[in-house]
Image (tube, rainbow, N blue to C red):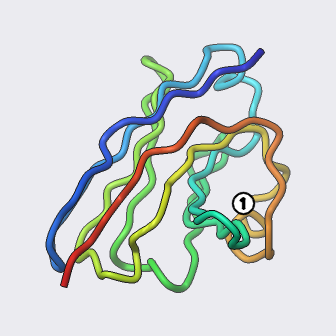
Amino acid sequence: QVQLVESGGGSVQAGGSLRLSCIVPEYTFSNSYCLAWFRQAPGNHREGVAAIDKDGTAKYADSVKGRFTISKDSAENILYLQMDSLKPEDTDMYYCAADCADIEVAVTAINPLFNYWGQGTQVTVSS
């Protein structure tokens, strides 16, 4: 069973920052064309937030463009999401995901598909 482990969530005021981290199993990290972050609240559809491919090319949802930055550490098999200028509407459960087929689709499709994802980390932004 592939296990991705997120950390770094928390509660911040609007305008603040958080940095999410995700430890990805080495085999999954190395063999995934695409790694991504998505957010989803219970009962809501999944929303791709950011995705990065093997070459380091990144794509972002329009709602977070210019505020969030996805990056990865290939030596440590860690995926990051730097979130700045946070807004109350960013409040959600955030998940890291692996093995997506296309970084553009990962951030534009409704309920994008991923083969693996973690347990999630809660981000709460107060106004």
**Residue in the foreground of this view, choosing between 42 and 11:** 42
Q: Residue 43: horizontal and vertical position, in percent?
A: 70, 69
Residue 47 falls in image quadrant: bottom right
For the C terminus, which image quadrant?
A: bottom left
Q: What amino acid is found at the position of numbered circle 1 in the picture?
A: Ile
Q: Residue at x 76, y 40 (%)?
A: 33
- Residue picked out by circle 1: 103
5 w.r.t. 89: above or below: above
Q: Residue 71: horizontal and vertical position, in percent?
A: 43, 47
**Residue in the foreground of this view, choosing between 102 and 16:** 16
- Most extreme residue toward the front is 43
Residue 54 falls in image quadrant: top right
All told, the count of numbered labels is 1
For the N terminus, which image quadrant?
A: top right
Q: Residue at x 61, y 57 (%)?
A: 51
Q: Residue at x 70, y 66 (%)?
A: 46
Q: How many other residues sit within 10 Å of disc 1, few (<14), some (14-19) or many (≥20)?
A: many
**Residue in the foreground of this view, choosing between 69 and 49:** 49
Q: Residue at x 36, y 46 (%)?
A: 20
Q: Residue 119: horizontal and vertical position, in percent?
A: 57, 36
37 w.r.t. 74: above or below: below
Q: Is residue 87 left or right of residue 56?
A: left
Q: Secondary structure at mark 1?
A: helix
Q: Is residue 1 left or right of residue 74?
A: right
